[in-house]
Image (cartoon, grey):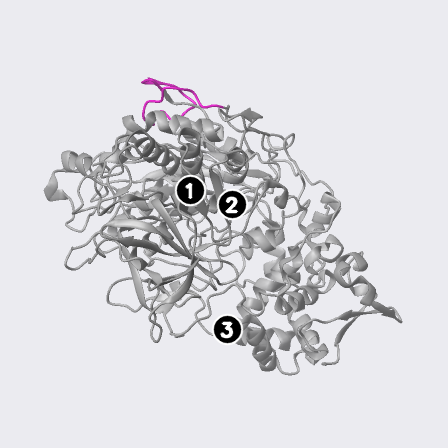
Amino acid sequence: MKRREFLTIPRAALGGTLLYTLAGEAFRVQAQDGNVKVPLRFFTAEEARIVSAACARIFPSDASGPGATEAGVVIFIDRQLAGPYGRDKYRYTKGPFVESFPEHGYQAKENPRETYRAGIKTLGDFAALPPAEQDARLVAIEQSHFFQLLRTHTIEGMFCDPMHGGNAGLIGWQLIGYPGPQMSYRNEIDKHFGQPYRPKPASLQQIMGRPGQPWEDEKD
Amino acid sequence: MPVWIGLLARKGSESELMTNLKPVDVAIIGGGWTGLLMAKEITAKTPLSVTVFERGGPRKTSDYAVTMDELDHNIRMRMMQNTAEETITHRHSTKNMAVPVRQYGSFNPGTGVGGAGEHWGGASFRYLPDIFTLRTHLTQKHGPAKLSADLAVQDWGVTYDELEPLYWKSEQLMGISGKAGNLRGKKIDGGNVFEGPRQQEYPTPPLKRSYASSMFEDAVLKLGYHPYPTPAANLSETYKNPDGITRAGCAYCGHCQRYGCMVGAKAQPTNTLMPVLATRKNFQLRTGSWVRRIVHKDGRATGIQFTDASGEEFFQPAATVLLASFTLNNTRLLALSKIGAPYDPIARTGTLGRNLTHQVSVNTRVFFDKPLNAFMGAGSLGARISDFDGDVGLTGAEDGLLRVGMIAVGSNGEGPIGSFGTMPQGVSKSNWGADWKKASLAWKDRSASIGMAGEHMAYRQNYMDLDPTYTDKFGDPLLRFTLDWTDHEYKQREFAAQIQARIAREMGAKFDEGKPSRARYNVINYQSTHIQGGAIMGLSPETSVVNRYLQHWNMPNLFVIGASAFPHNAAPNPTLTVLALTYWAADAMIGRYFKHPEALA
């Protein structure tokens, strides 16, 4: 059996309630010297470091607020790739695979796991580079399918429900003032015209009092 | 008792072992709005045994309690038909090779009990009266010489006046929330004054007004147009329908289209039809039953052949077969079963697959300096104008433009993932990185979209047939679309974009000016799940697949129900018309056909 890989993150780097975010595997989180070790489902530790560094350039942590690092975006992506989405369980993958018009979308055979595995290799020693060189390397692959997935997944990991492993501590929702999947706005929908209405964010589990069933946990 | 039947003979095997089931009176293919409504009508008014075959799984309101999750539902399309098992292929013209739609997509077919009726938005319009006689209308208005030889619109064989009482039954079934604009000929401000005459006011009053819809209404009133609230199957208040089914009012939670409703406020087959059917002794529902062929002999259907979830194959004998799945599968199953002559767009022969239509749309994104709290909403919450629907707003001076559509703003509930990064063009050079992040945050919750839902007319060259290359999980050919926009659709968009710009200016909004692109048909970007045609209704077997009662011209004990029967698309969402036509066919079946099961027309 493959040795389980972990992503080691400084505790302080992650937003808020880490244990909540990692609810699916809460007891496997091990704290050491202010670090947390997150068990990885798909990436190797080295791959996770590279993806994490790239996501931090796509959605940086800066004066305008927290970013991909604090939200745990890499954990989100790891889980997506490990689940049915990552292996194209729900995409039509029969051949022949032919080049077609852009209006036909992604037509290639490679599933997201394969796209990441190959794409990460093209980033080389990415995690060790200074930010300006990291950006240059990303600009060079901007048009690739890999980069487009990476960018899309970074936004998803910032603002998804925390049951998917991203948006740690609801930090993404706090950043944009999204209140989470509230049960009812019946008394609010026709009020607050032109004024911000920003109830305190809550996750699906907090609102419903029981956990949701994220698709990535679907058994094969 | 197992019997040998050679229906699915493949290379190397003459026939297959199949289990023969006990005959039923009526076998219905598809457990969505049309199939279950047919079952409800037939089991209420006849003692006939009815079995519905649904290839997806069972569903009920309580399944939706913990599903308000944008990622899995709105982005990964968790409720939709699994494209890995079956999809369609698309090409722009007969000159190209079609490729598969590998993931959704410009439309989202449903699966499971309730079908797309579970995850729809709930917009519930009547069509303009002239839609049903469009060929006659356009010929009278413009003269036959002005109409392109490729224009394939036809009269439906049924009229608005015939459907009016059935529209009303459909509105009552779902409790539609709205405001009448034409009550027995009397025009009423605040409703759609361009609609056909209605005999009754809507069952429930309109939904509340969102900020976006109030701004839109104020602006269009100043421009002299006639705004009205989008008629909605998302109830404005608690409602009890004629079947005694009570549903709650909408909570405006913003998780509607692409989600099931956790409180049952949105009319769905599972909360509106299934509770009634559950009490009927002559009704059966078989989930996980994938119908592969309609079996027929000597011009009559003898039953259906299906594969269950474990892979076992069955033959279900039936006296009458109702094909009531989505437009795509209605057309495909007829083709796979070799019922009717496939349409050939070059020779202009055959009928099966002709008149494929989708929806013509164009959107103008409008930006404000104030927040809209756009995470609140309901699937059909919004305001619109029909001043340019059909040819109402055309003077005749528009070069070649025959029909346009409705212009609307909606508050459907924006998700935090899908809406992030929405900003006026040119604000950020990149679509990632620090500057982009800063701009995205500055423009968050500052925008709405003024859209057009446009009529899509039918053309000779847009059609469906079986793909010669790609197959489904069983090895059966996929359905192939040959579909592209024509000059008329580009003109519709350009015309509508000008109206949208006028409204945007009046709203005081910032927006991106310029002509809409003349891009080819695109299978990636969502447009609507309004796919019509393939098994169209009409007055002659030369030009249609089913007669005016949705009965197959070549096979009297087979009816094909759904938007597959629409000879062309109207601007509004099709569900209410699909339901009205279902009642229309059910009345003909129950009143005449079951007494004498032969051709009705």
> Mark 2 or 3, which is nearer the eye?
2
Query: In percent of the image, x 20 and y 38: which residue is there?
Result: B397
In terms of depth relative to the viewer, which is nearer, B429 or B218?
B218
Q: Main secondary structure of the magenta part?
A: loop
Host chain of mark 1: B
Host chain of mark 2: B
Where residue B551 sits in the image (x, y, percent)?
Answer: 27, 41
Number of numbered discs on residues: 3
In terms of depth relative to the viewer, which is nearer, B301 or B124?
B301
Residue B200 is one of the magenta-drawn residues: yes
Q: Which residues are magenta?
A: B183-203
Left or right: where A23 falls relative to B488: right
- The answer to whether B369 is drawn above or below residue B299 in the figure is above
The residue at which mark 1 appears reads as: B35
Disc number for residue B119 = 2
Instruction: Identify which amino acid the numbered label 1 is placed on.
Output: Gly
Query: In percent of the image, x 55 and y 42: which residue is there?
Result: B256
> Mark 2 or 1, which is nearer the eye?
1
The residue at which mark 3 appears reads as: A144
Left or right: where B528 falls relative to B401: right
Q: CA distance from mark 1 to mark 3?
A: 44 Å
Residue A83 is one of the magenta-drawn residues: no
Disc number for residue B346 = none
Q: Earlier in the sequence, mark 2 or mark 1?
A: 1
CB of mark 2 within 8 Å of CB of mark 3? no
Q: Secondary structure at mark 1?
A: helix
Q: Secondary structure at mark 2?
A: helix
